[in-house]
Image (cartoon, rainbow, N blue to C red):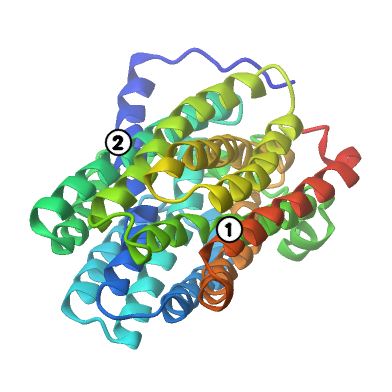
Amino acid sequence: MADKPPRRNKTTATRLWPLLAINFFMADMQSGIGPFVGVFLLQHGWASGMIGTAMTVGNVAGMLITTPVGAAIDASKRKRLWVIIPGVAVVAASSIILLRQSFWAVTVSQIATSIAGAAIVPAVTGITLGIVRQRGFNRQNGLNQAFNHAGNMAGAALSGYLGWQFGYVAVFLLSALFGVITIACVLMIPPRSINDRAARGSKEDDPESRPSALRVLLKHKPLLVLAFALAAFHLGSAAIVPLYGMAAVSDGQTTNGPSFVAATIVIAQGVMIIASVLGMRAAESRNYWPILLASFLALPLRGILAFFLTGWWGVVPVQILDGIGAGLQSVAVPGMVARSLNGTGRVNLAQGAVITIQGAGAALSPALGGWIAQWIGFAPAFLLLGGLGLLSVALWVAFGAAVKHY
């Protein structure tokens, strides 16, 4: 059972508002462009298989860099810099894809976006731990994720409106603007307010109590079970949103691609806000195991609904399930990693490693889903992708003894 978070004084509160603002505006940097890229390229003559391949190349780049970035954040005394760099990368990525739609230009754009997403999550985790310490992390992380999902919802709604009024150019410009605002917000956090030992999960009385990186990555069983269960989940989940938008556009069920994609994101992110707050509350009185189990179970149900319901009829139920799964994971995954690695001084390395392994599934998902859809159709692709959630459930239940303590 987690300890109750300490009371916050006014000084701490003034440092947390910029942190919440970072989570709000970084949301569009992380995933706001992704679903729109697929529809944007589809309307520029790309086939679903090539779209998925370009996204996969970018995802692989982000996957490979996440673990070393987590280790670098543990060692760094300039945590804010690891938010500034992703902000610059997103602005560059948005510029590239607007100027050219060749395969390599789009791929470079996806690489820049993926690297930004890979770096910013452990960076914000480290900053949060450094400010509120381990005792306050669960609650603050829950608030962070609620603001993050709210930012995604606002960004998607704005993107849908601007895309409808002004075209896809406005969607990418909005993402670049969010990147600039994120940089401004992180500069508002005083560097001295971030305790470097707390930020990496070191014990206060023993700053050198850090096991080797290899030992953390290979011998920490709860970490491995969590990572591989997430990899199976994201192998199925990551492709569903972009494929759902492409299916509606290809079948002529919608003539307004930006608005349709925006609707899928707004619905999911609205549910994620509620799910992240409920997940935070649940974690204060019990461990993270049942929270993650519920998130894994949402994927098979989502795949079945996407198989039977397409277009506007299926948006609400399919994306509600997406919101439940992703919202619970947004709180439970960093919370479980921080709790299980507390005292090792390797928290951000572990966060990066989990993101890397789950990223392997997410990286392969667009290509897998894209080619399946191209070969046998969108509806069967949804069913097969959703079925991968059952593998996550099987891993989580089979190794429950190793992870139920956290």
In this rendering, position of residue 94 left or right of residue 247:
left
The answer to whether residue 246 is above or below residue 25 is below
Q: Is residue 202 visible?
A: no
The answer to whether residue 218 is above or below residue 274 is below
The answer to whether residue 168 is above or below residue 41 is above
The kind of residue on which mark 1 rests is Phe
Q: Secondary structure at mark 2?
A: helix
The kind of residue on which mark 2 rests is Ala
Front-lying residue, 343 or 281: 281
Q: What's the mark number on residue 382? A: 1
Q: Residue visible at 15% across and 52% down?
A: 164
Where is residue 71 drawn, in percent x and y?
58, 61
Front-lying residue, 278 or 24: 278
Where is residue 130 drawn, in percent x and y?
49, 38
Q: Quadrant of residue 336?
A: top right
Q: Mark 2 and mark 1 in contact? Answer it, CB < 8 Å.
A: no
Q: Residue visible at 80% across and 61% down?
A: 215
Q: Earlier in the sequence, mark 2 or mark 1?
A: 2
In this rendering, position of residue 316 left or right of residue 32:
right
Q: Is residue 299 visible?
A: yes
Q: Residue visible at 70% across and 55% down?
A: 387
Q: Quadrant of residue 338?
A: top right
Q: Look at mark 2 in the image and give the residue it sits on.
A: 21
Where is residue 36 drawn, in percent x and y?
31, 60
Front-lying residue, 286 or 397: 397
Q: What's the mark number on residue 167? A: none
Q: Secondary structure at mark 1?
A: helix
